């Protein structure tokens, strides 16, 4: 057996070789300068390394409109969320089709150059379809509303995917994860998407998935998240501690994903799947309220959305659909409604608010909810933020 093919059949690489990068640096000084937002910086990095294969740059109008309306690129390839460059209007006013522009990080350092193939109006009402709501209280809609009114499209030529990457030792590209899987002899790999510390129920899901596959990729998002999400450095301390003490090391890998969360629920579950497909995984865990926020999506909408695709042909990844799980005192195990006959009074599943209150008070949540070592890391963080 061999690893799954990338989405679209080929792993994209938009990083310039050393000679071309040096030339790009020299020429960039005379180009019109565009500062990328944190989300756009994460998107550029994924375009550069092939995480967004088959995309080779920021989307043009035909791709943008069909993605928003039908979850497909203009050529029919499944893609659920637009990847666009939409700087503030004061910047785009001076940029025209055919211009070569420099794309910089927030400190003005060069990341890439791009020849503008299209400049088109940013239809924000259409993009709101991605989130299923026009409500600006939704974090994804809020970001869209603050973006510019014009989009710039074109292939990117990347000098540096990230000038100051977090967690460089864990920041593996799709090519690197694929090489690692092959060297370990893994043909089937399950991936777990997370933006939170892993509690006992999450641990259960990942280990059930590992029973079905050769290996497990724990692949947390370390791009832009909501302000009230637990910061990436705290979460990484939790992941490394948990893997070190409770997972089989020869069957488990930790790598980070520089994607900014959209909180687009069902559509984001599809995006997360396709990205991990590019990283070489064959199975993807989709649990309760995947990538959701507030009450915008149904509990299992992120699982149901896959029913509209020809999974083997159009996505190619086995979707592992898990129901809500919790520790059952009677069963003395993590269970779901599929495996446990007992009522909710037997379940240990404290609310997020209650857990945070305990952490701030320096108290560990129940051991059935969180490993004590993880609780101690979170207590230190919770007390530091007050």
Image (cartoon, grey):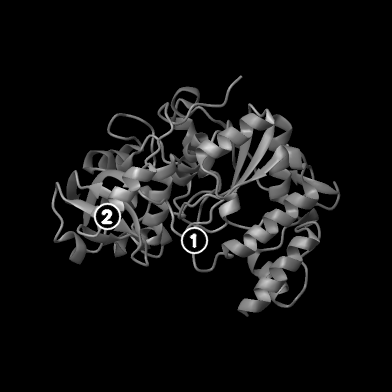
Q: Is residue 101 visible?
A: yes
Task: Give the residue pinned by disc 1.
Answer: 225
- Going 42% across and 53% down the picture, which residue do you hit? 42
- Going 65% across and 31% down the picture, which residue do you hit? 183
How far is the residue under mark 2 from the one under mark 1? 34 Å
Residue 246 is left or right of residue 80, and the answer is right
**Image coords of residue 109 (percent x, y):** 35, 62
Residue 213 is left or right of residue 64, and the answer is right
**Image coords of residue 316 (percent x, y):** 50, 27
**Image coords of residue 195 (percent x, y):** 57, 55
Task: Give the residue pinned by disc 2.
Answer: 26
Q: Quadrant of residue 354?
A: bottom right
State the residue in front, 374 or 141: 374
Is the residue 84 above or below the residue 177 in the image?
below
- Going 80% across and 56% down the picture, which residue do you hit? 368
Considering every residue shown, the one lying at the far top of the view is: 1
Mark 2 burial class by Cα count in 10 Å: few <14, some 14-19, many 20+: few
Q: Is residue 148 visible?
A: no
Residue 189 is left or right of residue 349, and the answer is left
State the residue in front, 64 or 357: 64
């Amino acid at each position: 057996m061999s690893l799954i093919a990338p989405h679209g059949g080929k792993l994209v690489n938009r990083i310039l070789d050393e000679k071309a990068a040096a030339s790009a640096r020299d020429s960039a000084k005379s180009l019109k300068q565009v500062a990328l937002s944190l989300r756009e910086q994460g998107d550029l990095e994924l375009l550069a390394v092939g995480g967004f294969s088959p995309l080779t740059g920021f989307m043009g109008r035909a791709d943008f409109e069909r993605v928003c309306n039908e979850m497909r690129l203009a050529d029919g390839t499944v893609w659920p969320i637009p990847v666009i460059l939409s700087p503030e209007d004061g910047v785009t006013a001076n940029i025209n089709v055919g211009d070569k522009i420099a794309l910089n990080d927030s400190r003005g350092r060069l990341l890439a150059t791009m020849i503008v193939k299209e400049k088109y109006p940013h239809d924000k009402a259409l993009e709101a379809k991605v989130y299923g709501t026009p409500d600006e209280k939704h974090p994804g809609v809020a970001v869209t509303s603050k973006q510019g009114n014009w989009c710039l499209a074109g292939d990117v030529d990347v000098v540096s995917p990230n000038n100051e990457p977090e967690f460089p030792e864990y920041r593996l590209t799709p090519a690197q994860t694929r090489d690692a899987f092959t060297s370990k002899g893994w043909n089937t790999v399950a991936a777990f998407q997370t933006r939170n510390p892993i509690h006992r129920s999450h641990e259960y899901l990942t280990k059930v998935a590992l029973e079905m596959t050769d290996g497990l990729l724990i692949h947390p998002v370390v791009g832009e998240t909501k302000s009230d999400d637990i910061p990436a450095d705290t979460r990484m301390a939790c992941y490394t501690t948990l893997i070190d003490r409770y997972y089989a090391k020869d069957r488990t890998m930790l790598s980070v994903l520089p994607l900014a969360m959209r909180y687009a629920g069902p559509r984001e579950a599809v995006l997360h799947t396709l990205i991990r497909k590019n990283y070489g995984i064959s199975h993807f865990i989709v649990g309760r309220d995947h990538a959701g926020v507030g009450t915008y999506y149904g509990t299992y909408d992120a699982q149901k959305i896959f029913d509209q695709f020809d999974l083997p042909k159009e996505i190619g990844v086995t979707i592992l659909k898990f129901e809500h799980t919790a520790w059952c005192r009677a069963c003395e195990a993590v269970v779901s409604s599929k495996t446990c006959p007992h009522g909710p009074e037997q379940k240990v599943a404290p609310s997020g608010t209650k857990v945070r209150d305990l952490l701030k008070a320096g108290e560990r949540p129940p051991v059935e909810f969180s490993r004590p070592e993880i609780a101690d890391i979170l207590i230190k963080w919770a007390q530091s933020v007050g």
